[in-house]
Image (tube, grey):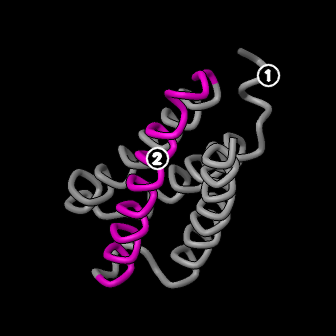
Amino acid sequence: MINNLDIPIFKKCYDLYKTFYGYRGDVSKQDRYTIWQRCENCILDVLEAILLASQSGKVEKLPVLESASVQLNVLRVLIRLTKDMRTIDNKKYLVLETHIDEIGRMLGGWIRSTKER
């Protein structure tokens, strides 16, 4: 199990969650229990899917990775919405979006390599 926690995409997603969680105190109570909670759940779903994919066999891996990709895209939209609703400022949005973009590139590469096998 320790080896699965060492994969770079897991570390990136883990760091995304830590960064996201650090911003929680700056969010109004009204937003914290609505869209913020939904974003947090999406991040945790992606993290869980990455861990599951790292432990899955070849046949099961691709559907799990594709599901993680969909969840990441949902997260991308929700994070943009938090910025547009002024739940977070532009600086925090850019930090989160940079993390999400990097995870998306890594996930896309993993999906492509899985399809080639």
Examine the structure image and report whether residue 75 is included in the region drawn in magenta: yes
Secondary structure predominantly adopted by residues drawn in magenta: helix
Magenta residues, start to end: 55-84
Q: Give amino acid for label 1.
A: Asn
CA gap between label 2 and label 1 equals: 20 Å
Q: Which is more toward the observer, 29 or 19? A: 19
x, y (%) of residue 52? Answer: 53, 27
The crowding category of the residue bearing disc 1, from other C-alpha atoms within 10 Å (few below 14, some 14 to 19, many at least 20), is few
Q: Give amino acid for label 2.
A: Ala
Q: Is residue 64 above or below residue 77?
A: above
Q: Identify the residue at horizontal 39%, vertical 52% (top origin).
A: 71
Quadrant containing the C terminus is top right
Left or right side of 106 for 65: left
Residue of label 2: 68
**SS category of the residue bearing label 2:** helix
Q: Which mark is residue 3?
A: 1
Q: Identify the residue at horizontal 66%, vertical 64% (top origin).
A: 105
The crowding category of the residue bearing disc 2, from other C-alpha atoms within 10 Å (few below 14, some 14 to 19, many at least 20), is many
Q: Identify the residue at horizontal 35%, vertical 71% (top origin).
A: 77
N-terminal of the two: label 2 or label 1?
1
